[in-house]
Amino acid sequence: MKDGAVSSILGMKFRHMRMEMPQPNNAASAGEAKVDEYVRRIRAGETGVLEGLPDVVRRSVEGKLSKDNEQLENESGEDEFERFVMKHGTTGGGEFTWYEYRNNRADRMKESGAFEWGKERIYFDVSPEQFGQLRDLSIRVAGEEKISVGFKYLDIEETQRSSPSSIDGNETWFVVNFASREDAKRWYDALARTPEYASLRSGRSMDYKGIRIDRIAEYAPGFREARGSLGRMMKAVRLPGGLYEYENEDGEKRRLRTEDFDRMKQQYESLKRSLEEARWFWKKDAPREGS
């Protein structure tokens, strides 16, 4: 075949392919531009933009608005684990003064009820001189691991100044709260891997009736208080007539009916099982120092 014939055939094929390629749809482009215009007007605060529009156009506008909102939420969500608000205030009728920190995600979850203060927490008996170091480390790990975190630590100096008798060595020093047990463990595992954490010193060794996970930290979920109260009830003595008598935490005598005692016993056994499940959850990995 001569070169000219080949060129002619190739040229015909090229023209044929070019004719079959999709061409810009001016009507579609104009429609998209109109949708973008409606979106801009709505975002500018104009009302009634969607009134009277055909259903297909209105759905397109609403869909783009929804997509844009989702994108904005995802973009703004990049900082919500790293940004913390701080409060400085008192509890216990002004006895104790605290610094409290919570990142933006924890704040949002708290509003919806998904972040319950005191439900999942880790206590730290780090030396008071290193509260600031643990604070900065807690914030950094929460941001890096993208975990909802709220924590507080005692302002010992201010508490001693305003209410010196309240400091007796049994008060909480530093406690970190989480939305779930999984979040607590993931945050702690990341924290424990940092060289800064290894440098923290113990200031004491309190028993929080939880699970000791290292030399300064103890996991103690919220049900520990209920377990303490129920534990006292389990020491009740059966009296003639079917009543049970026990001492509450203030040393006062209290009585329970048999059916109430049986119900409390069931709750107590359930909490014991919950604690054992939590113990397994924390211990299923390699044992930690001081455990």
Image (cartoon, helix red, strand yellow):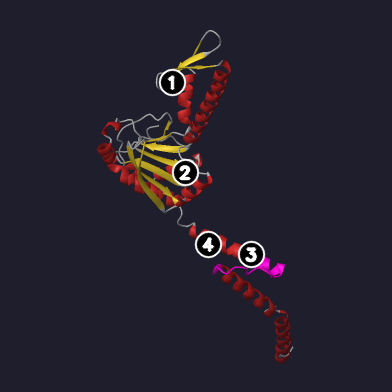
Q: Secondary structure at mark 1?
A: loop
Q: Report which residue position mark 2 lands on.
A: 186
**Callout 3: few (<14), some (14-19), or many (20+) C-alpha neighbours within 10 Å?**
some
Give the mark toward the camera: 4 or 1. 1
Disc 2 marks which amino acid?
Answer: Arg
Quadrant in the picture for residue 171: top left
Q: CA distance from mark 2 to mark 4?
A: 27 Å
Query: What crowding class fits label 4: few (fewer than 14 Cα within 10 Å), some (14-19), or many (20 or more)?
Result: few
Task: Give the residue number, with chain letter if any, for mark 1.
Answer: 248
Q: Nearer the viewer, residue 91 or 203?
A: 91
N-terminal of the two: label 3 or label 1?
3
Circles 3 and 4: CB atoms closer than 8 Å: no
Question: In this rendering, is residue 173 above or below 41?
Answer: above
Query: Which mark sits nearer the N-terminus, 3 or 4?
Result: 3
Name the amino acid, label 1.
Answer: Asn
Which segment did they paint magenta?
43-62
Dot 1 alpha-carbon crowd within 10 angstroms: few under 14, some 14 to 19, many 20 or more: some
Indicate which disc, 4 or 1, sits on the residue closer to the N terminus: 4
- Is 54 within the magenta? yes
Mark nearer the viewer, 2 or 3: 3
Q: Circle 3 sits in a helix, a strand or a loop, which is it?
A: helix
Which one is earlier in the sequence, the residue at label 1 or at label 2?
A: 2
**Residue 157: quadrant of the picture:** top left
Mark number for residue 72?
4
Figure check: 226 above or below 193: above
Which part of the image, by quadrant, shows the C terminus? top left
* Vertical relation: 226 (above or below) 147: above
Q: Which mark is residue 62?
A: 3
